[in-house]
Image (tube, helix red, strand yellow):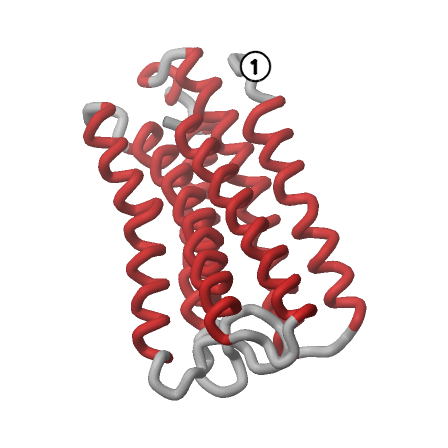
């Protein structure tokens, strides 16, 4: 299941970044920015960046399930259904509600030569910020609980060595990627509310490294992979 999560995190990040590039190209080449083209790019950016965070949430919940609820046995099929409903269903619901609630006055997208959610008029950006930061907070709490359980004496009795290795790999992945994604989009929000060039540089740098960190901590440092 941790590999399913990593694959979907990578796919979501890939598609979201492609939409990000398309949105940037639309904003640069079309002045004034085409509402229809920009709105399409923003919708898929919003959806897939949220999916990225919700799949990170699923990785953390999987950690919690395998560490805290060691006596509970859930089938793989049931896990997969829950993971895909949360991983893609919740982001889709949020993205659709955001479009519907801002469609009337056309305040869905930014009107400041950038293809992204509106901030100054409708505060549509909160539909990304609130879920993302909430997931970061939940993941950090789950990590504290999981690390306590793993390090506590006697946990090895309930968890086999291979399983314990998988938990450690997954915990390390969540521990690195959660703050990275949270910090990146903290600066991403800053680019919408500030014109400071330094914030834009830091956001671009962190954003460009997300895929690299997924590769290193989600794949290359996993011995089985």
Residue 211, how many percent across, how many down? 62, 40
Q: Residue at x 30, y 40 (%)?
A: 84
User: Count of labels shown?
Assistant: 1
Residue at 43% over, 12% down: 162
Few, some or many residues within 10 Å of mark 1 (<14, 14–19, 20+): few
Residue at image x 49%, y 57%?
A: 45
- Depth check, front residue: 4 or 224: 4
Which of 26 and 168 lies nearest the eye of the viewer? 26
Q: Which quadrant of the rendered structure holds the N terminus? A: top left
In this orientation, does residue 71 appear?
A: no
Give percent across and percent down for residue 122.
44, 84
Which image quarter: residue 5?
top left
State whether residue 140 is above or below residue 30: above
Q: Position of residue 87 (x, y in %)?
A: 35, 45
Instruction: Return the x and y of residue 79 as percentages of the image width and height.
Output: 25, 31
Is residue 106 found left or right of 198 in the rendered image? left
Q: Kindly state the secondary structure of the residue where label 1 is placed.
A: loop
Q: Residue at x 58, y 50 (%)?
A: 17
Q: Is residue 24 left or right of residue 36?
A: right
Visible in this render: residue 17?
yes
| Mark 1, residue position | 223
Report the front residue among 183 and 92.
92
């Amino acid at each position: 299941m941790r590999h399913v999560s990593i694959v979907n995190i990578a796919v979501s990040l890939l598609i979201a970044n492609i939409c990000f590039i398309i949105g940037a190209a639309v904003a640069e080449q079309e002045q004034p920015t085409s509402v229809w083209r920009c709105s399409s790019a923003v919708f898929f950016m919003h959806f897939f960046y949220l999916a990225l965070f919700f799949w990170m949430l699923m990785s953390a919940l999987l950690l919690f399930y395998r560490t805290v609820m060691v006596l509970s046995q859930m089938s793989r099929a049931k896990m997969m259904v829950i993971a895909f409903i949360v991983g893609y269903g919740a982001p889709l619901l949020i993205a659709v509600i955001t479009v519907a609630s801002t469609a009337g006055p056309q305040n869905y997208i930014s009107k400041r030569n950038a293809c992204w959610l509106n901030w100054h008029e409708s505060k549509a950006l909160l539909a990304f910020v609130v879920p993302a930061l909430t997931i970061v907070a939940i993941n950090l709490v789950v990590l504290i609980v999981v690390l306590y359980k793993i390090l506590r004496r006697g946990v090895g009795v309930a968890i086999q060595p291979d399983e314990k290795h998988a938990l450690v790999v997954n915990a390390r992945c969540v521990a690195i990627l959660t703050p990275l994604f949270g910090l990146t989009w903290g600066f991403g929000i800053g680019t919408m509310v500030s014109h400071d060039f330094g914030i834009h540089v830091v956001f671009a740098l962190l954003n460009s490294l997300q895929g690299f960190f997924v590769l290193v901590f989600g794949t290359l440092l996993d011995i089985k992979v």
